[in-house]
Every structure is written in C-alpha cells, then in structure tokens.
Image (cartoon, rainbow, N blue to C red):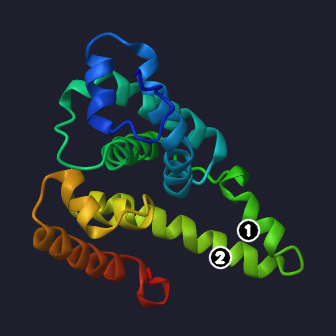
Amino acid sequence: MTTAWHDDRVDDRAIVRAVLDGNRDAFRPIVEREAVAVYRTCLRILGRPQDAEDVAQEALVMAYRSIASYRGDGALGAWVARIATRQAYRRLAQRRDAADISTIPEPATRTDAGEPLAAALRTERAVELRRGVAALPEPYRETVALRFYGDLALDEISRATGRPLNTVKTHLRRGLERLRDTVGAEGSVS
C-alpha cells in the first residue's frame, strides 16, 4: 500500500527522506501545514503583510533547499519556524527606519474602529517591542522570537535550536529582562 503525501500518518522524517531522494512534491504537505504559522510569525516580527508574505515564501524555499540539514530531533515545523524567524529579523535589519503607514496591522484598525487613539498606541507599542526584540543579542533574540512570535513551547524551542531545556529557559528569562530594560515595564510581554 502506498501512502499519499497528504496523509496525516506520514511523519516528518519520511517526508525529508523523500525530498532528499528527489521527490519535489513530498515537501508540499510541509508547506501546506506550516505556511500559515510561518506567515504569522513573519507578520508579527515585520508588521507589514507584504514583507511577511515575501519572507514567509523565502523561508519555505530556504527550508526546502536546506532540508538535508534537518537533524530530525525535533518537529520539522519548529525547524521551519526558526528559519522564518531568522529571515524575518534579517529583513527587519535591512529595513529603513522611516515611518510607514503599512506598519499598522489590519486587525488592530478593525477591532479598535471606535478608538483610533487606543489602536495607534497599541500599534506603536507593538512596533517598539518588535524593535526591542530585534535589538536583543543572540541567543536571546532567537529564543524570545520563537517563543512569542513563533508561538513555540519551550521544549519545541529546545529541540529546534539544539539547546538544553534549562538553557532555553535561561535565555528566555534573560532576554525578557533585557527587553524590559530596553522597552520598559509597561510593555512587558506576557
């Protein structure tokens, strides 16, 4: 019996083996499964839908091209999220600091339609937090970004980065402390 690539029973290692054996279609389930999460991660970091789309596509292409480096000791989705996070921060570092109206996320303007000042303040704070996270030194930036922008659990971050769980916890705590010092206590991440 041949297993279809869209079958949920196919594990990540089987997909990786198939891609490495030359089956380009084998990566499609990973794209279909992870594309939304990758886009959301990029959008949270970059704040611009157009940039998030571009970087998400770049990250998925990069994941496909570097699939041989996937060790298989963690979820393939976490590995892809790590690539997307790094790509988003690279793009953010290349961006000019000029203000851009597209940095206001659409959900904030829709939800706060009756309160434009609250929406503007919340958006400004989100931009400030993104810049604060981007300014963190490694490995704190990566750990904080994977936790809050990539929505990964601590054990997933541990597997994705190859660091022990207690090290990940320490990096997260120290990263949040530095972020709090940089951005301020009222902008603390929860």
x then y, percent, for residue 22: 32, 10
Residue 49 quadrant: top right
Disc 1 to disc 2, C-alpha distance: 8 Å
Say if mark 1 contacts mark 2, CB within 8 Å: yes
Q: Which amino acid does label 2 sit on?
A: Arg
Residue 69 quadrant: top left
Residue plotted at (73% across, 53% down): 101
x then y, percent, for residue 140: 23, 64
Indicate which label's residue lies in the foreground, 1 or 2: 1
> Pointer 2: what residue?
122
Left or right of 8: which side holds 99?
right
Residue at the extreme front of the image, as rendered: 1
**From what the image shows, is residue 128 above or below residue 57?**
below
Residue 121 quadrant: bottom right
- Secondary structure state at the residue bearing disc 1: helix
Q: Which amino acid does label 1 sit on?
A: Ala
x then y, percent, for residue 173: 23, 79
Residue at the extreme top of the image, as rendered: 22
**From what the image shows, is residue 147 above or below residue 79?**
below
| Front one among 28 and 107 | 28
- Circle on res. 108: 1
Left or right of 102: which side holds 40?
left
On the rendered image, what quadrant is the C terminus found in? bottom left
